[in-house]
Amino acid sequence: MKTKERAQALSLAAQPFSELLGPSTVEDLLAWVEAELGDAAALDQWIRHGQAQTKALAPQSILHVFKSNTPHAALHSLIGGLLLGAHNRVKLPSSGLAEVEEFMAGLPEALRRLVVTAGELDRTWLTSSDAVVAYGSEESIAKLRLIVPSGRIFLGHPEKASLGIIWDDPESASCPEAARDASLFDQQGVLSPQVFYVREVTPGFVRNYAKNLSQAMAAFNGGQRGRKISTAERAEIANLRAAYRFRASGDLRVALWEGGGEAGWSVVYEEDPWFPATSIPRVIFVKPLPENLAESMGPAAEYLGAVGLWPCEKELAERFFNLQPSRFCSLGRMQPPPWTWHQGGGSRLASLVKWVDFEPTNLLTA
């Protein structure tokens, strides 16, 4: 199959997963290839490269190692491998990933043959795959990297932290958009915000924004069906709520709004600008925007995924460019990202291919 044919088949298979993947038309997928490889046909034919020609060579086999709580990332990765035409070995988490299995069922036979899955990691897969794409904790990725033979392509995607910045919003118009970003995927993705930093334009504005956000969270989550929260996660939510209820009872610098039962949503207002190193499901912090946000981020600054902006203006992105996220975007658009997104600041397709150049006897002229 040529690239365009694969894109057509993948677009059809992706349609039932639009909430996870966003728009996935043939044009979207081909635009992704063109953005990263310079030409949508670069895998199928020679394309101009300076005074010569070149052709992209996809890896014969790609090993994907997926986490259980990020099915959207798993589908993105698998679709990328199939779009390149590679054979894909998929290490599923022990609990499985229903979305991946359902997606595979919608593939034509020619593409389904390019995917094999397993619940246990076959050691031979690590040593014989041309490329490894791994999602997980920094520790688990580091262990994998040590046993992948040198010379093989290795793309590790550790857990990230994301945030939103509300710079100018006197009417709290961004709250429905912020609630969407904070609710989708139960904050388990690398683009899921843990904190919204709000500029204190008038005294009490940030606290009031947190209250308005809690109303938007209640409205958004009333019509959403999230994943099942585990017993351990319920305990984490209960402990966090109890701690902040106690603090709020005697400290005006802290407030808590909650709803939806023991596995519902929580909004925490806290004047301390320090970034909370937590990814407890459905818990969002609202804090005043400090003068030096990078300093308040602490160690989390090295693991910043996305920054949602309100308003989403280039000048505001420039103001906070020193945070060096992989993506600035508007609130409400933090997830899912466009296919052309540079995950972790790198190219997801271009990083997997090699190039073969052809230099004719008479080099090409302009």
Image (cartoon, rainbow, N blue to C red):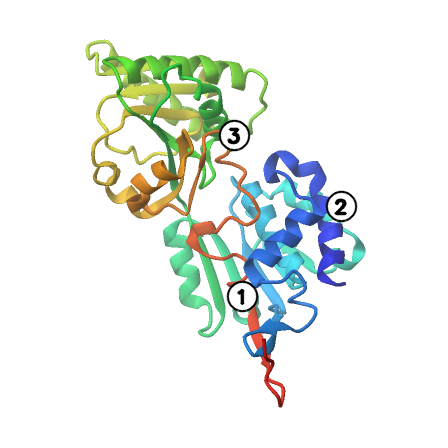
Residue type at mark 3 is Leu
- What residue is shown at x 26% (from left), y 38% (from top)? 297
What residue is pinned by disc 2?
106
Residue 331 versus residue 305 in the image, above or below? above
- Neighbour class for label 1 at 10 Å: few (<14), some, many (≥20)? many
Q: Which mark is on residue 174?
A: none
What residue is pinned by disc 1?
131
Q: Are marks 2 and 1 in contact (CB under 8 Å)?
A: no
Location of residue 235 in the rendering, given as x and y in whole percent from the top left corner: 39, 25
Under circle 1, the secondary element is strand
User: Is residue 15 something one can see in this rendering?
Assistant: yes
Residue type at mark 1 is Ala
- What residue is shown at x 56% (from left), y 79% (from top)? 51
Q: Identify the mark nearer the N-term, 3 or 1.
A: 1
Under circle 3, the secondary element is helix
- What residue is shown at x 41% (from left), y 29% (from top)? 311
What residue is pinned by disc 3?
184
Residue found at the very far top of the displayed protein: 249
Residue type at mark 2 is Gly
Q: Quadrant of residue 147?
A: bottom left
